[in-house]
Image (cartoon, rainbow, N blue to C red):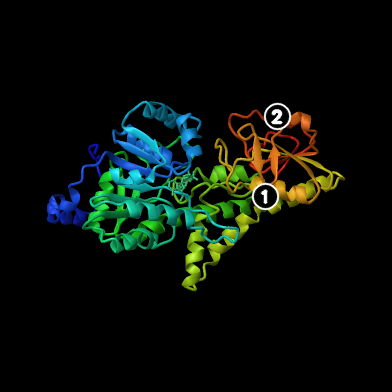
Amino acid sequence: MAAPGLINEVPSDLLTQHRILEGLDEHPANQTAFDFDVAIVGLGYVGLPTALAFQAAGSRVLGVDVSERRLAVINDERADLLETDRDRLTLALRDSSFDLTSDVARLGTAAAVIICVPTPVDHFLVPDLRILESACRTVVASAVPGQVLLLTSTTYVGCTQDMLVGPLAARGLHAGADIFVAFSPERIDPGNDRHAHEDVPRVLGGSTSVCAERAAAVLSSYAKNVHIVPTVDAAEMTKLLENTFRAVNIALANEFAEICQVMGVEVMDVIGAAATKPYGFMPFYPGPGVGGHCIPCDPHYLLWQLKRERLSTPVIEQAMAGIAGRPHRVVGRIRETLSERGAGLTGARVLVVGVAYKPDVEDIRESPALEVLSELIKQGATVGYYDPLFSTATLPDGTTLIGVDEPTAFGADLVLVHTAHHSVDLAWLQDQPVVLDATYRLSDLTNRVVL
Ligand SMILES: NC(=O)c1ccc[n+]([C@@H]2O[C@H](COP(=O)([O-])OP(=O)(O)OC[C@H]3O[C@@H](n4cnc5c(N)ncnc54)[C@H](O)[C@@H]3O)[C@@H](O)[C@H]2O)c1
C-alpha cells in the first residue's frame, strides 16, 4: 500500500491501543498478499473521483461497477467529472495500477474495499436500500481475512452493523480481529472545484478502535485529514446532520425569498450582506427546490428511522415539506404571472432553461425541473426545455422530452430559468416577454419576476 499520509485528529487512546495490538499484523489472517490496495464498489459521482484520488496518490486501484454501460462511459472518458478528475482519469486509464471491472469476484484481491453505491428513497420517501443491501451482500460474500471494508454510502444509523459487521460475523469473520469494518461519509460536491478532494477532511467511525485505525490508514493514502469519531453510529449520524442542516437552511432561504418578495427587497442583496459577517452566518440560497442524490433523500433516512423511536422532529419535517413543495410553488407563480398579463396557463408556451438540479453538472436526478415540466403539461401548457447538457429529459411519468436547440425559436410566452450553467449564454432572455427567475441571480433583467 502507498505510504499513509498524516492522520490528524486520531484520538491518543486509539494510538495507545494500536501499540497494545501491534502483534495483530502477525495474525495469520493478515498475511494475505493483495493485488490492489483498494477496490471501489460503485463508480458514480462519488466512487469515480474517489478511485482517481487514490490512484493519483499512488495506490493500486480496482474500480468495480455492475453497469457495463457505466464502465464504457468511464473508459471512453465521457464521465461527468471536474477538470482535475478528467485529467486524472486520462492518466489512470494508461496506468496498469488502475483497473476497471464488472467482475465482483475480484473484490477479494484488494486490501481495502470501499462501498459507494446509491441510497435513494422510493416514491413514498422511504429509504430504498435494495442496491446497498445487494452491494454489501457481495462484499461480505467475497471478504477475505485482513481486509478493510469501508462503507461510504449515506445511510441510516446502524447500517454498517446490520449490513456488514453482523453478516461478516455469521461467516466467522469478526470485526477488529479477522477483518476491519468502518463507516466514513462522503462529502464530494459534484461541479464544485473550490475544494480539492484530498483537502476535504474525512469523518470516520470504526466498528472497533482497531477498525477505525486501519480504515483511517487507508483513507490517509489520499486524504490529508481523517477525523475519527468514537463509534460507527456517530459517523453515520454525522452525514445525516450535515445534509439535514443544508435542507433546513435552504428551506429558510426559500422562506426569506418570499418574505423579501412581499416586502419589496432583493433577497440576494440581503443574503450577500449577511454573509459579510465572519461568524455565526453561512449563506444558503433560495431556488426552485432541491435535486441530486443528497438533500432530497438523506434527511428522509433520518426521519424514517425516527418514526420507529416515535420521536417528533417538526423543524426537519417542515423543512423537507417546504422544499418538496417548491416545484408546485413555481408552477403557481407561472400561472399567476401569465394571468397578470391576461393569459392562462392552458395553451401557454413555457420554456424551462436548465434542467440539471444545479449548475454545471450533468445530473438530472430528482431535479425540480422534471416535476415543474410534468405539472405544466398536466395543466395544459405547451412546454419545452433548453439545456445543452441534456439532449433528452425523462419525466417522472416516463414521458421523454427532447431539448430545444434554439431557445428564441420556441416562441415562449414565459421563460422559467431553473438552472443557469456558467457555460450557457443567457443574453437572449432580455428579449423574452417575461422571465421567471428561480435562480434569483438575474437581477439585471428588466423583464424578470421572482418566486
Ligand atoms: N452525488 C453526490 O453529490 C453525493 C455526495 C456525497 C455522498 N453521496 C452518497 O454517495 C453514494 C453514491 O452516490 P452517487 O451519487 O455516487 O451514485 P451514482 O448513482 O452516481 O453511482 C453509483 C454507481 O454504483 C453502481 N452500482 C450499483 N450497484 C452496484 C453494485 N452492487 N456493485 C457495484 N456497483 C454498483 C452503479 O452502476 C453506479 O455507477 C450515495 O449513498 C449518496 O448518497 C453522494
Q: Image quadrant of residue 51?
A: top left
Name the element at disc 2: loop
Residue at the spot 46% in from the left edge and 34% down from the top edge: 193
User: At label 1, which amino acid type do we have?
Assistant: Glu
Q: Image quadrant of residue 40?
A: top left
Q: Quadrant of the N terminus?
A: top left
Residue 383: x and y, percent?
Answer: 76, 41
Any part of residue 111 in sight = no
- What numbered label is drawn on residue 371? 1
User: At label 2, which amino acid type do we have?
Assistant: Asp
Name the element at disc 1: helix
Tag 2–tag 1 contact (CB < 8 Å): no
Label 1 near ligand 1 (CB < 8 Å): no
Residue 230: x and y, percent?
Answer: 29, 59
Residue 214: x and y, percent?
Answer: 24, 50
The residue that label 2 is drawn on is 405
